[in-house]
Amino acid sequence: MADPDSFFERVYDVVRLVPKGRVTSYGAIAKYLGAARSARMVGWAMNSSHGHEDVPAHRVLNRKGLLTGKFHFDGTNLMQQLLENEGIPIQNNQVVNFEKYFWDPVQELG
């Protein structure tokens, strides 16, 4: 079985590349890493990333732009506040015009 820590580190490497003011999804990262059916494992990596200050976990959302990981941040609205501070509008725990802010690592990183 593959080392999950290695997979997590590969996830973190991709997340570090998401530009400020942009967001991506668990599934897009999984697809980029050649593990298209592993969006949930990317989510686990994000849940474990909070000791890594250089990993902007707040920029990783579900495929519909919902802030599904918000409960893993300190404070009830920290994830939303971090995104809004980068100019990303949020309404009802979801990015408004998600496709406008979506960053696809498959297209951006080739």
Image (tube, rainbow, N blue to C red):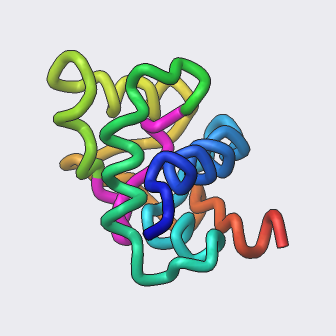
Residue 12 sits inside the magenta stretch:
no
Q: Which of the 4 image quarters holds residue 26?
A: bottom left
Q: Which residue is depicted at the point 27% across and 44% down?
A: 69
Query: Split into 4 quadrants, where in the image is the N terminus?
Result: bottom left
Q: Which residue is depicted at the point 42% across and 58% down?
A: 42
x and y percent of residue 29 in the render? 56, 64
Tag count in the figure? 0
Residue 93, compared with residue 1, is above or below; it is above
Position of 7 compared to 19: left or right?
left
Question: Which residue is the extreme one toward the bottom?
Answer: 37
Q: Nearer the viewer, residue 27 or 88?
A: 27
Residue 45, compared with residue 85, is above or below; it is below
Position of 2 compared to 32: left or right?
left
Position of 110 compared to 99: left or right?
right
x and y percent of residue 89 in the render? 43, 42
Query: Split into 4 quadrants, where in the image is the C terminus?
Result: bottom right
Q: Which residues fall within the magenta stretch?
A: 56-66
Q: Which of the 4 image quarters holds residue 78?
A: top left
Q: Which residue is depicted at the point 39% across and 54% down?
A: 61
x and y percent of residue 2 in the render? 49, 65
Residue 90, compared with residue 110, is above or below; it is above
Q: Which residue is depicted at the point 41% across and 82% down?
A: 37
x and y percent of residue 3 in the render? 49, 56
Question: Which residue is the extreme one toward the right?
Answer: 110
